[in-house]
Image (spheres, rainbow, N blue to C red):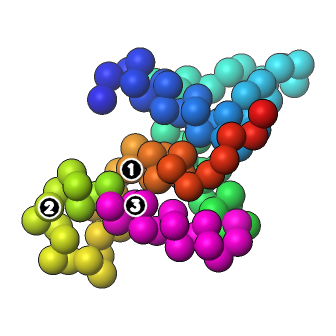
Amino acid sequence: MTPDERTALNEAVCKRLGWTAWWGDTGLEQPDFTSDWNAVYRWIVPAVKEANSSVRVRFSAAVFAIVTEREPARTAAALIYALYATPEDYCRAFLAVTEVNE
């Protein structure tokens, strides 16, 4: 994944969370989305935990689908697929099951 692709993915997640300009007048610097996965990744977990059960189930299924598509050999280890998920996988799954907050 290139830095530009990573930045676009992270910015899309922030948009879904409604955080497109959260750094605005706060005096905080804009996060470096090209290298700091935690700037976005840590927001996905609480958002999914607070979502209804339908979204949580769809999120889990989306992560599983993404991991098994990338690594078909891992399908046999279905119970531990999440161990093979990358931050990018979680971001893509989050985007797949959430609606745009605009």
Horizontally, residue 64 falls left or right of residue 54, namely left
Circle 1 sits on which residue? 89
Structural crowding at the residue carrying mark 1, measured as other residues with C-alpha within 10 Å and reported as few (<14), some (14–19) or many (≥20): some
Task: Identify the image quadrant of the C terminus.
Answer: top right
Q: CA distance from mark 1 to mark 3?
A: 6 Å
Secondary structure category for the residue under label 2: helix
Amino acid type, residue under disc 1 in the picture: Asp
Residue type (three-letter) at the residue carrying disc 2 = Pro
Which residue is more in the foreground, 40 or 13? Answer: 13
Callouts 3 and 2 close, C-beta under 8 Å:
no
Mark drawn on residue 63: 3
The disc placed on residue 50 is none
> Nearer the N terminus, badge 1 or badge 2?
2
Examine the rendering and report whether any part of residue 36 can be seen. no
Majority secondary structure in the magenta region: helix
On the question of residue 73 being in view, the answer is yes
Mark 3 vs 2, N-terminal side: 3
Q: Are marks 1 and 3 in contact (CB under 8 Å)?
A: yes
Q: Is residue 68 above or below residue 80?
A: above
Q: Amino acid at mark 3?
A: Val
Q: Of the residues under marks 1 and 3, which one precedes in the sequence?
A: 3
Quick one: quadrant of the N terminus?
top left
- Residue 31 is situated, as x and y percent measured from the top left of the image, at 62, 26
Q: Residue at x 46, y 68 (%)?
A: 60
Mark 2 lies on residue = 72
Image-quadrant location for residue 11: top right
- Foreground label between 1 and 2: 2
Please say if the residues under marks 1 and 2 sit with CB atoms less than 8 Å apart.
Answer: no
Picture residue at 73% right of the left edge, 67% below the top: 50
